[in-house]
Image (cartoon, rainbow, N blue to C red):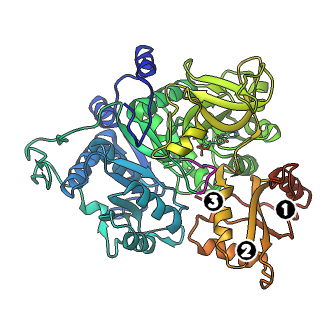
Amino acid sequence: MSTPEAPTWPEEFAARYREAGWWRGETFGRMLRERAAEHPDRIAIVDPAGDPAGDPAEPRRWTYGELDRRADRLAAGLLARGITKGDKVVVQLPNIAEFFETVFALFRIGALPVFALPAHRETEIRYFCEFTEAAAYVIPAEDGGFDYRDLAAQVLAAVPTLRHVFVAAGDPGAFEALSDVPVDPNTDPITDPVTGPVSDPMSDPITVPDPPGPSDLAFLQLSGGSTGVPKLIPRTHDDYIYSLRGSNELCGVDASSVYLVALPAAHNFPLSSPGSLGALYAGARVVLCPRPAPEVAFPLIESEGVTITGLVPPLALVWTEAAPSSTYDLSSLEVLLVGGAKFSEEAARRVRPALGCTLQQVFGMAEGLVNYTRLDDPDETIVTTQGRPISPDDEIRIVDDEDNDLPVGARGHLLTRGPYTIRGYWKAPEHNARSFTPDGFYRTGDIVRLTETGHLVVEGRAKDQINRGGEKIAAEEVENHLLAHPSVHDANVVAEPDPYLGERTCAYVILRAGAEPLKPVAVKKFVRGRGLAAYKVPDRVEFVEAFPQTGVGKISKKDLRAAASATRAPVPQPGGPSQPTQT
Ligand code: AMP
Ligand code: DBH
């Protein structure tokens, strides 16, 4: 049912998707319970970081039974702290086992994880907490040399709704350790301050008073966006689980699969295409990779027998370069998914010879639609297209600037509607009126063409965004930060080509009349100082007197992009400043 916060599918579509068997009335809470009942002793999660309380040299291995019990106990503890159905909880965790304990506990209660990325900083996190009126924020103590407790202290001071900060790994400092939250329903009676007793102390598993249903929201995912602030994407249990089931089928994931989470776990791609949640749905094994560098990932592929993983194009390039001289045995790897940004045909051709596995291109979006090349597609299709939709009920339109449908083969705007594509962003009615057609098609902002075989080829982008190796940057968001500099009169941010990342950001800046001259590095420092994720800091800053204009006097980003390509700074070398940003 549509709410003012989250528009959803009209009833006739919902009925059709149920009838077709896409939506089966599943929830994440029940899914884990069922898998744990079916095969309690099978390994679900492998975290190479080890057990801080046990042997840190031995990977932690949680069975389905253990993950289920942990989710239950944490759910009980969160309820006891007053976190209930509908509450929002910003989850900003690296690739550690506690990520899954946390999100399944929240799923069970019906509280909604808001999936932040480890790279996000004060500006983004504060916005997520304020906008969703988050009740809690879950962090590691430290990761990648950054202290998330300092960030949490700033956010906590600024956001009145935020009642709890839980530290999932490391020294909690002034906050509560996540490991102190769980309660054992067998020994500790649990009382919700509002609804009273929530469990019978003798019963295990716990009984959640008002568990979420299949058409309830499961979480809020982030959009790369093209506007001043990131948009939040409301996904339901049933629609997301359908995308997992469909992905598993097309990617060959079954109970014997081993999925390596190489990208940040909360990102939609490694979460759901088919990702960790797809693997858990299948009863498979999820191996967490703390960093995607070959020297970290390759030993894990060998030791854990990884069969499938997903990478953004710059990392796929790094892996294909490293694999031929690697001493690790990568022969267990059957499928490498590559997506998030356009994978060049030349790079795609190198995957099988270098890694000995099947390439599967994936063109997806957190808003919904996911396209895969099929494992048995001809090699030419695999290396030259970005795949075709998961569902027979995914509707695809390719249209001109006036929304007229174009003939097959023509380049145009991709519009889509279907059983796992949202009908609107969370709490964004004005933006929704622009991003969706009146009959509910999502305007992806991608320029694509359709081949005779029904595969999509991504040809470009109409949205004002930079795709920096799979990390999306809304030009307007960075422009707003540049405009906050007292010496900046105006600013425009565009993409320029980069051999590794595909694109990187170039900021054109006009200084105020009479302002002291600025160095590019000072501008970058200023943007970084605004508390933004590092990948949003412009790679290049150019000062200009004026911006090129279109015939009607609007600023021409097209001309700026052309200028940026023509004057591109010297090509950076691998290992240099344009290596993929770790998020
Ligand atoms: P988001 O909406 O932030 O989840 O980002 C999804 C966007 O990433 C898509 O709309 C595309 O612009 C881009 N994208 C994802 N996968 C691919 C791919 N394989 N090739 C080209 N662009 C992609
Ligand atoms: O870029 C994306 O958002 C993306 C890419 C591949 C995605 O959301 C997905 C697969 O599910």
Which residue appears at 61% of the width and 59% of the height? 582
Q: For mark 2, what is the residue?
A: 488
- The crowd level at tag 1 (other Cα within 10 Å; few <14, some 14-19, many 20+) is some
Amino acid type, mark 2: Val
Q: For mark 1, what is the residue?
A: 547
Q: Quadrant of the N terminus?
A: top left
Q: How many marks?
A: 3
The mark found on residue 44 in the picture is none
Image coordinates of residue 279 in percent, x first then y, are: 46, 35
Tell which circle, 2 or 3, labels the residue nearer the N-terminal end. Answer: 3
Q: Quadrant of residue 446?
A: top right
Does residue 10 show up?
Answer: yes
Question: In this rendering, is residue 331 above or below 55?
Answer: above
Q: For mark 3, what is the residue?
A: 477
The alpha-carbon separation of the residues under discs 2 and 1 comes to 14 Å
Frontmost of labels 1 and 3 is 1
Q: Secondary structure under badge 1?
A: loop
Image coordinates of residue 309 in percent, x first then y, are: 58, 41
Image coordinates of residue 19 in percent, x first then y, are: 41, 14
